[in-house]
Amino acid sequence: MNINDTPSILDLMPSEADINECVKQGKKREPDCQNHIKVVELVGPNDLLVCGTGAYNPKQYRVKAASLTLYNDTKSTFEGKGVCPYDPFDRVVSLLSVDRNDSGKSMIYTGVYDDFLKTDPYILRQPLFFSTHAKTVPKIKTGTEPDWLNRPHFVGGSDVGEEALFFFREEGKYCLRPEKKIFSRVAKVCKSDPGYYDMYWISYQKTRLLCRMPGDHEDFYHIEDIAEVDDVFYALFTKSFEEVKASVVCSFNKNAILKSFVGKYQASCSNNGRVRSSTQEHSMSGSCGVFRNQNNSFSSMYKNENFLMEQELRGSNVFYIKDVVYTDIEVSSNISGQNDTTIFAASNGGQIHEILVQFPPSNSVSRIYNIFYGTEEVRSLIYFRDHLYISSDSSVIQVNIRCAKYEKSEDCRSDPKCTWCTSAGCKSDQTSCSNGSTDEIRSKKVDIKINLGSTTFLEINQTLPNSEPIL
């Protein structure tokens, strides 16, 4: 796919009335009072569900996928509350699920702030606004008490069959320590959950996620992003204080995450700050099958009052680096045809680091790409079909990461996943060289070593062949 091959443009500018109302509320005309697109979901082969902030008045749109045009009916535009945020700088998690839902219909799951003042965070499920059952199927959501969600920052999610997973960080504290901390979580809801009184999740559970740099003794790294490859979630954690900056990537197996929701719930705090005894494991803990073949009278008899699991889940360390803060990651497997795993990480300085996963885990960066002029911040990073799509506030750039893009042997050899064949050019697989070992020049791995405790920053001014800017 080449993003220059799509000439269609859909103008979804907010109305002047919405902009003026936004400005009256104390927001800036730019960037606050514009329509920042936060959600794009493909609904079947023909439709796109698009949602934007709408100048602090969220709007949903039903768009024809082939032509990028709105439908000419009353169902083409609808209120976007609960689907995308008001604040353009908020992250939202959206999952479109077409099966195993309680209603039997397609539903959208979101982790989002649902109000102007950002006091109402929810993980919720609702029907598509243009569906025939939009007015008959109720929304199911988390409650407003902080035990459900306490000032969360959503970073990612996944539809894993019978469950929907949400990754986020939130405020919390230990019973015997008054100060607040930030904890990284993964939460689960059952897609077949009929809801407590048709309003609140019955199946909602959450587990603390732990990830640290080797040698560290604290786990207060904040989850920033996730990437999913097969049955593994790669999670980016960062630590950013005045004097300490670090980024760590840990992997979490999907089955280990689901297993973490089976067991006892976390002990709660009494009014005097002491720890109460841990609650016993509930018979519904971790299981979504219990909701099958049940009616709503069953759901109204039960409401869970504790959501955090007692057992924490520690990830396997994959990569770590000090003095660099990453904001987004994408992960690709088997780019070179040798069952390797490659991480692409966006730094807060606007660069892309390419990292070959090694065991034991290392702090070795294979390549650094300078994507934008200056230090423009990367807003989004997506890997799709051997290309990276990188967006900033001003442009989107498509970068070909296949080895075949290199025309010169020195460029090919500088990429650790590539091999230069004297007769066939740059290849990702050494066996592709037509005359075997006598015809190949193996790639020389170029690593950037950043030692722990060092403040040295090394840079490669990498030319990006076959990159396509869209302004």
Image (spheres, rainbow, N blue to C red):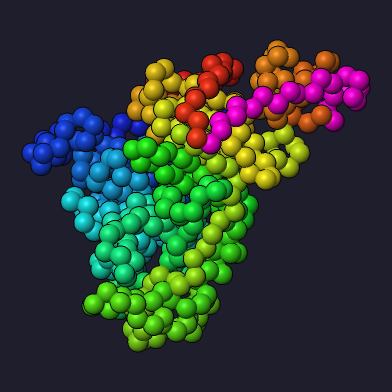
Inspect the magenta stretch and tell me whether residue 305 lies in it: no
Nearest the viewer among 257 and 7 is: 257
Q: Is residue 118 left or right of residue 126?
A: left
Residue 284 at x, y percent in the picture: 47, 81
Towards the viewer: 304 or 273? 273
Residue 148 appears at what percent x and percent y? 32, 67
Residue 448 sits inside the magenta stretch: yes
Up-down: is 74 above or below 436? Answer: below
- Residue 44 image point, x, y percent: 49, 50
Query: Which quadrant would the N terminus be assigned to in this image?
Result: top right
Image point 21% across, 36% down: which residue? Answer: 32
Q: Nearer the viewer, residue 7 or 431?
A: 431
Closer-to-camera residue (248/109): 248
From the top left corner, tell me how far across and down residue 96 is, in percent: 45, 55
Q: How many marks?
A: 0
Name the residue located 49 percent from the left edge and 57 percent from the top edge: 210
The quarter of the picture where the C terminus appears is top left
- Kindly identify the residue that appears in the image at 10 percent across and 42 percent down: 25
**Residues rendered magenta in the picture:** 431-452
Instruction: From the viewer's perspective, tell me whether residue 57 is left or right of residue 344.
Output: left
Is residue 136 visible in this depiction of the protein?
Answer: no
Can residue 305 be seen?
Answer: yes
Placement of 250 over or under 23, stated as above or below: below
